[in-house]
Amino acid sequence: MAAKLVCLGVVFLAACAVADQEKDPIPMDPPEALTCISDYYGGEPRLEDREWVLRFGDVAIPWDDGEDRSFEELLAHPARIDIRDMVAQPYEVGPLRPLTEEDGDPGYFVPPALLDAAWGSDPQQRAANLVNVRWFGKPEIHDRRYSDARLTVTDAVVPDLREVADHLDHMLDWHTDYVHPAQPPVLAHYVTGEACCRSYVPESEAPMILGEVGEHAWGIAVDMNLRYADNWNDGMLEHDVVWRNQMPQAIVEVFEDHGFAWGGRAFHYRTGQFVWRPELFDDRCQL
């Protein structure tokens, strides 16, 4: 009897070993794109239960949950966005042109949990990281409306935004009207780049209000002058999307050279918005 039990035990272990071998092997090193993204957002790539995650203390954000979700599903359920979705669509620089592929929105999806872990999950945490960046305050700009213009962003964005301001400040005078934020009281929090802590819209409303993804809530987005900003819906919820743009190529290139994705390179476009997404410009972060 004892011999039979030993034999059965050996058979069981052998069967388990075969089953493990039949599973897809897990690479010992994390995906290069995951490591690259951690360079910008923090966290530690870790292998947990045969799945790669980006670990922030008690929070684990999946690299790839294995689900192939549609654009509409990701839009309706932002909590289901994984890190791989961030770079699923490549962001392409070059001449400004419409993106005609429906739902072609590179860089649109970011896990809210990742932004919370990187920049703060509540207004108090985020406020502690905010910095005012002087925006075209040099003497050669004589319009006093602009002399004290500032943008408020999280501290990680500051070096790149200051570089953008310095480069634009040396361009010809024609650029100034485009890049100066609209002045209060018109939508002050939205158009001056301040972290006004708006968030994802309720899931029941999300499919109707594309674009309210809350980049400003974490202090990583800035909006330019509304006079030159075009949006895919132009205030309407449903109609054929027609691409319009007034933002000059030179300005877009300066922002992109410093890690800011332009909202005009999307099917659901927002040409006045620039979002700090350096991973979109790093080849290591691409799939």
Image: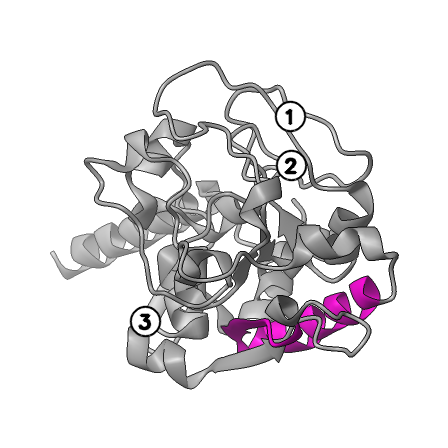
Question: Does 113 sit left or right of 29 as displayed?
Answer: left
Instruction: Give me the C-alpha separation between circle 1 and circle 2.
Output: 6 Å
Q: Residues within 10 Å of mark 3 (few under 14, many from 20)?
A: some
Above or below, 231 against 259 in this view is: above
Mark 3 or 2: the one toward you: 2
For the point 48% across and 52% down, the residue is 83
Q: Amino acid at mark 1?
A: Leu
Q: Secondary structure at mark 1?
A: loop
The segment highlighted magenta reads 147-169
Instruction: Give me the C-alpha separation between circle 3 and circle 2.
Output: 28 Å
Q: Amino acid at mark 3?
A: Ser
- Name the dominant secondary structure of the magenta segment: helix
Verify whether residue 136 appears in magenta: no
Name the disc covering residue 121, or none: 3
* Depth check, front residue: 15 or 221: 221
Name the disc covering residue 99, or none: 1
Contact, mark 1 vs mark 2 (Cβ under 8 Å): yes
Residue at the far bottom: name it. Answer: 128
* Depth check, front residue: 30 or 208: 208
Measured as percent of width and height from the top left, residue 84 is found at 51, 47
Residue at the far front: name it. Answer: 143
Residue 2 in view, yes or no: yes
For the point 53% across and 59% down, the residue is 221
Question: Which residue lies under the disc numbered 2?
Answer: 265
